[in-house]
Amino acid sequence: MVSVMCSTISSGTDMKNDGIASANISALHCIDLSCPDIHTSVTLLKQACLDSGFFYVVNHGISQEFMDEVFAQSKKLFDLPLEEKMKLLRNEKHRGYTPSLDEHLDPDNQINGDYKEGYYIGVEIPEDDPESQRPFYGSNVWPTAGTLPGWKETMEKYHQEALEVTKAVSRLIALALDLDVDFFDRPEFLGKPIATLRLLHYEGKLSDPSNGIFGAGAHSDYGLITLLATDDVSGLQICKDKDAEPQIWEYVPPLRGAFVVNLGDMLERWSNGIFRSTLHRVLGNGQERFSIAYFVEPSHDCLVECLPTCQSKVNPLRYPPIKCETYLLQRYKDTHADRNSYK
């Protein structure tokens, strides 16, 4: 594994190659998962969760060589003719291909859907297993080995390795919330998670926010945490205060060898609003862009409710309890096109 060093990425970072003013760059903390000083890591992570809900993770255990292979295989998938990709169209379990404009994350401000195509890969459960009947478990949709040799094996390996990184980050989050270090390792949380790998391809269309054109519309993620690997093309923006008028959007610079990690809605609910699930979007700058998101949610039956360490007279209960499965099904329904519209 190649060691990556980083400090807080500041607004002085040079991104002139993408035509982005340095003043619009967000300053994010960087968490080194190889650091033996857990106290320092927890302190940095907690500050990041309070400030923006976004941070970098480095020295996470996945080699750069393997990450490059995952990106290469992702590109091979998206380079297929559209008619071949449509044979892999997402199924009722949200596995498979999603064409451009399929997802509509910010309908209030978008004139069309997102100008990106994607591919969902979830937890693989054999069809003869009763758990395969759950909404977010089951068989994946795979390209044939003849079309993309080695593709399935690469993605399955990455799915497994990314889950281990997520668990390492979740242990730091648990400590930051004054919980036992293994709190999120329990079966109802990450012991039986809904973990979804999503390959993403932005085709190079230039975004125009004033006219409702976005690579990905403004949204917050649904679950516990998201790991995002990106190529070297900028586009991701965050808004630390969604209620500000006007909203202030800042770019998150790509950092080779690092994951961009952000908190999801369920962690904001669990923490009673102490930790933040931050609004983010993607603007296309005319360049083709690839990214790989890994969304991690707890088990289907997990009841997401305020953690005991996060409620007080000063911070009374903000959110009612909700079952993970119920919340996810509604969010997917709200943001994706009806599959029948492709018939």
Image: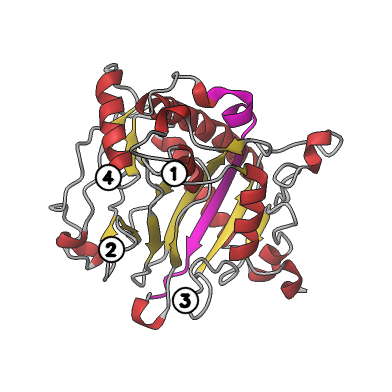
Mark 2 or 1: the one toward you: 1
116 vs 54, left or right, is right
Q: Amino acid at mark 4?
A: Asp
Q: Residue at x 27, y 70 (%)?
A: 245
Q: Residue furthest right?
A: 128
Magenta segment, which residues? 185-206
Badge 3 crowding class, 10 Å Cα cut-off, few under 14, some 14 to 19, many 20 or more, is many
Q: How far is the residue under mark 1 from the one under mark 3?
A: 26 Å
Q: In this rendering, does residue 302 appear at all?
A: yes
Q: Which residue is mark 1?
A: 268
- Of labels 2 and 3, earlier in sequence is 3
Q: How far is the residue under mark 3 from the one under mark 4?
A: 27 Å
Q: Which mark is residue 51?
A: 4
Q: Which residue is mark 2?
A: 249
Query: Considering the numbered disc 4 on the image, is that residue within a helix, a strand or a loop?
Result: helix
Q: In this rendering, does residue 208 appear at all?
A: no
Reply yes or no: does residue 172 show up in magenta.
no
- Of labels 2 and 1, earlier in sequence is 2
Q: Amino acid at mark 2?
A: Trp
